[in-house]
Image (cartoon, rainbow, N blue to C red):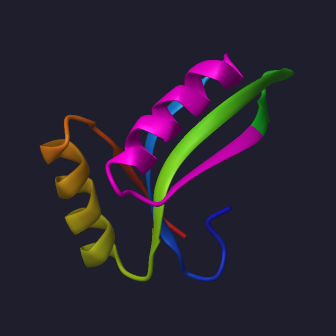
Amino acid sequence: AAAGGDWWVQLGSFASEQNANGLASRMRARGFNIQVSKVKSGGKDLFRVRAGPEKSREAATALKNRLAAAGEQGTLVAP
């Protein structure tokens, strides 16, 4: 997770692990470092897709902009 001062860019949260892994695979093929993590929300499993980590907000913002240029909107996730 976002421990140790790491910033992430969250690309999505999916009920379907297959959908999460599909997005992760597409973005990895474009050269991005992507993590898929399983989390519980409201008693259900969700699969979170994040790019990163980055050590600063500025670096995470730059990553968010590179992702947007690649056609994926993301949200910054603070440490």
The reply, left or right, for residue 49 in relation to residue 67 is right
Give the number of callouts: 0
Q: Is residue 44 magenta?
A: no
Residue 56 percent coordinates (x, y): 37, 81
- The residue lying at 51 percent from left, 49 percent from top is 50
The front one of 62 and 30 is: 30
The reply, left or right, for residue 57 in relation to residue 79 is left
Going by the picture, which residue comes out furthest to the front?
29
- The residue lying at 47 percent from left, 60 percent from top is 33
Q: Which residues are magenta?
A: 15-38
The reply, left or right, for residue 15 in relation to residue 62 is right
Q: Is residue 37 magenta?
A: yes
Q: Is residue 18 above or below residue 26?
A: above
Q: Is residue 10 above or below residue 2?
A: above
- The residue lying at 61 percent from left, 38 percent from top is 48
Residue 1 percent coordinates (x, y): 68, 61
Q: Quadrant of the C terminus?
A: bottom right
Quarter assignment of residue 58 = bottom left
The front one of 39 and 42 is: 39
Residue 43 percent coordinates (x, y): 86, 21
